[in-house]
Amino acid sequence: MRKCRLPRSPLTTRLSGSARETEDRIRSIFQWKKKRPPALVLAVTAGLIVLCGGLVSCQQRPAVPSIIMETQYYNSLGSYIEIPALSLPTGEQNEAVDAINAALDELREEYRLSLSGTEYGSQCLFYPSTTDRYLNLVFFQKDADYGNDGYTASWVYDKKEGVQVTAEDALALAGTDREALFADLEAVIAADPEDPRELYQTADPISLQGFRIKADGKPVFYLTAMVDCRDMGDDGFLDEWSRLYVWDNGVFTRYHCMVFVPDGPPYDQYPLVTAEETDQLDPPLWNQWYFAGEAPAGGFVDKSMLDVPHSLVLPGEDLYPYDGNFYAALLSCYADYQDQWNIYYADFQSDSDQAGDLRVGPVTYLGEIYPDETTTAVAYQVCYTFYIDGSRGLEGHANFEVVVLGFDTQTGNFISLLGRADFDPQGLSIEEIIHKATQP
């Protein structure tokens, strides 16, 4: 019978027929650690260590962007706009940074009229917050209107991974989801001991506006909730209101923000992000100088006079003397269809306002067209406020509307009111604006 010989492996120890030799080999196997390893083994091991270290050091780390304040604007009519851009070191590229900059450009376009005209009280305030890992870009947005606490927008960049953090990422860090977050806020609103409400009956009465991530890695969320009106008996109804809430470590806090008044007291305002967590930039941002009772570097841009198009000014005349003619024409138009009101012009509310007043405020020039050889049709966005006696005393109701006035092209004299309508002109051409405002 033929013997079957097993193949010999280089990793095995051959056992001979000699008992002595077999004992020596087994003893050698169990005592190898007591001996110095061969020099070749040491050399190979050291080479592997160096190679691994080199591979780690060769991994490219994401470049960290810096904040460049491209837009920083404060005018005398209470419009404060702060919109930055992110800048990478020369030669560096990052898709997340490009995406955030594109979104910031869209935000800048949203406030184009505020930067070019005399729009009142339009604000986009910046709260940068940088931690070891995250770059948080948080914005508080507020318009000079009635009915909301303001809104937020945010973008968060992960410096370690070089990516933009999504809302879903932040919710996962908090160990929750949108449905649970919204349900918790609805319960808080319904159980408010001072003003219990129900949500307004819309498809999405609660929305997640933005978030940031703190130094400890825990997120803070910003949410808006539209609450329903409340019956106050003989005093009528308390209007619905878009509230702004801040969620931090499982606790909701409502963020109150008054309508800002230039050079006025801060009332009960407080920063959206604490001063300790907010980056200190130079020149200082609004949140740095306002709460300190100071003014912006270089002062406010003076927008107390209307920007009148040159085509409506007679040759040789200065630009601003025409303003008196414009406001006289505008006030007469309001008096024609609001004869029950005391009509006047003023930049801001004063202590002398009373029921029956209609205050025409700042006006933004939108553009002009020439319907015929002798007429110039000029469109303006007008802010006006009327005052009534309400359940809480004197109440001011602010409104924006588009007004189209006709002027004599040759003399600049006012001809007539061509039309007025309540709509948002943003994104429309001047032809579309005037057509919409002058339609019956």
Image (cartoon, rainbow, N blue to C red):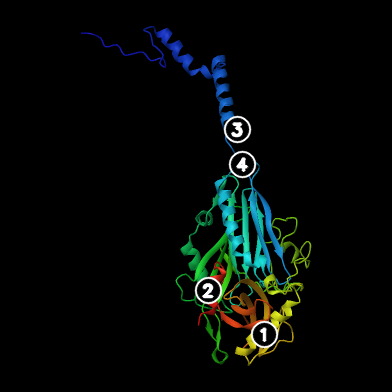
Please tell me the numbered disc located at residue 331.
1
- Residue type at mark 4? Glu
In this view, 7 is above or below 60: above
The quadrant in which the N terminus is found is: top left
In primary-sequence order, the first of circles 1 and 3 is 3
Residue at image x 66%, y 82%?
414
In primary-sequence order, the first of circles 3 and 4 is 3
Say which element carries label 4.
Answer: loop
The picture places residue 277, in percent across and down from the top left corner, at: 68, 57
Please tell me the numbered disc located at residue 92.
4
Q: CA distance from mark 1 to mark 3?
A: 72 Å
* Callout 1–callout 3 Cβ contact below 8 Å: no
Front residue of this view, candidates 333 and 210: 333
Q: Residues within 10 Å of mark 2 (few under 14, many from 20)?
A: many
- Of badges 3 and 4, nearer the viewer stands 4
- Of badges 1 and 3, nearer the viewer stands 1
In this view, 58 is above or below 374: above
- The image quarter in which residue 127 lies: bottom right
Q: Which residue is mark 3?
A: 57
Please tell me the numbered disc located at residue 317.
none
Q: Is residue 261 left or right of residue 238?
A: right
* Callout 1–callout 2 Cβ contact below 8 Å: no
Residue at image x 60%, y 83%?
417
